[in-house]
């Protein structure tokens, strides 16, 4: 039923509940989990020409690499096949494009990740993925996962 399961991460703790579900499904169906971190390329701001030649997104790139490496370690610990990727795009577009390129069977996302004013103004990445992809999306509620485990 599932061969490839995509779990986008923003590096937050809320992704753990989505990972639990993805790992269980991957174990059941002998599927590969794809851990994806999308660096929001709209977050970078260029300095004045010639004054700052450093890449303003490099810290986010490193954070993303750490986040997917942590997922890969956890996947290997539970015997799940995993592949990782870090991309620079608008997050919901990067998730959709990756899912299409890899022909994933399911996208598993947390209902909450990074929050704050940008989420209130622009809507969550999860909502945008739901609106823009034709692939099945399993949205895992952190609250429901906590209640189910009690």
Image (tube, helix red, strand yellow):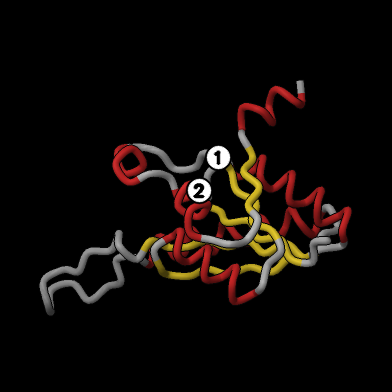
Q: Report the residue at 42% width, 63% height from top.
A: 39
Residue 52, position in %: x, y?
A: 18, 72
Quadrant assignment for the C terminus: top right
Left or right of 15, for residue 126: left
Q: How many residues crowd mark 1 within 10 Å: few (<14), some (14–19), many (20+)?
A: some
Q: Quadrant of residue 59?
A: bottom left
Identify whether 125 is placed above or below 140. Answer: below
Which residue matches tag 2? Answer: 126
Residue 4, position in %: x, y?
A: 74, 66
Q: Report the residue at 53% width, 44% height from top.
A: 12
Judging from the image, what secondary structure is the residue with disc 1 in? loop
The answer to whether the residues at label 1 and label 2 have Cβ atoms under 8 Å apart is: yes
| Residue 111 tag number | 1
Q: How many residues crowd mark 2 within 10 Å: few (<14), some (14–19), many (20+)?
A: many
Foreground pick, 106 / 143: 106
Foreground pick, 14 / 103: 103
Determine the CA span between mark 1 and mark 2: 7 Å
Residue 50, position in %: x, y?
A: 13, 79
Q: Report the residue at 51% width, 39% height from top.
A: 112
Left or right of 29, for residue 8: left
């Amino acid at each position: 039923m599932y061969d490839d399961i995509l779990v986008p991460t923003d590096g937050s703790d809320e992704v753990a509940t989505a990972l639990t579900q993805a790992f269980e499904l991957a174990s059941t169906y002998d599927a590969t989990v794809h851990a994806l971190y999308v660096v929001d390329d709209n977050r970078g701001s260029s300095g004045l020409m010639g004054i700052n030649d450093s890449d303003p997104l490099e810290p986010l790139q490193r954070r993303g690499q750490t986040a997917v490496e942590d997922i890969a370690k956890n996947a290997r610990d539970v015997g799940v096949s995993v592949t990782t990727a870090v991309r620079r795009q608008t997050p919901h577009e990067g998730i959709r494009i990756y899912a299409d390129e890899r022909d994933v069977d399911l996208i598993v996302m947390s209902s909450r990740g990074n929050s704050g004013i940008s989420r209130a103004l622009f809507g969550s990445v999860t909502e945008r993925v739901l609106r823009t992809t034709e692939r099945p999306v399993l949205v895992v509620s952190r609250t429901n996962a906590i209640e189910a485990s009690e």
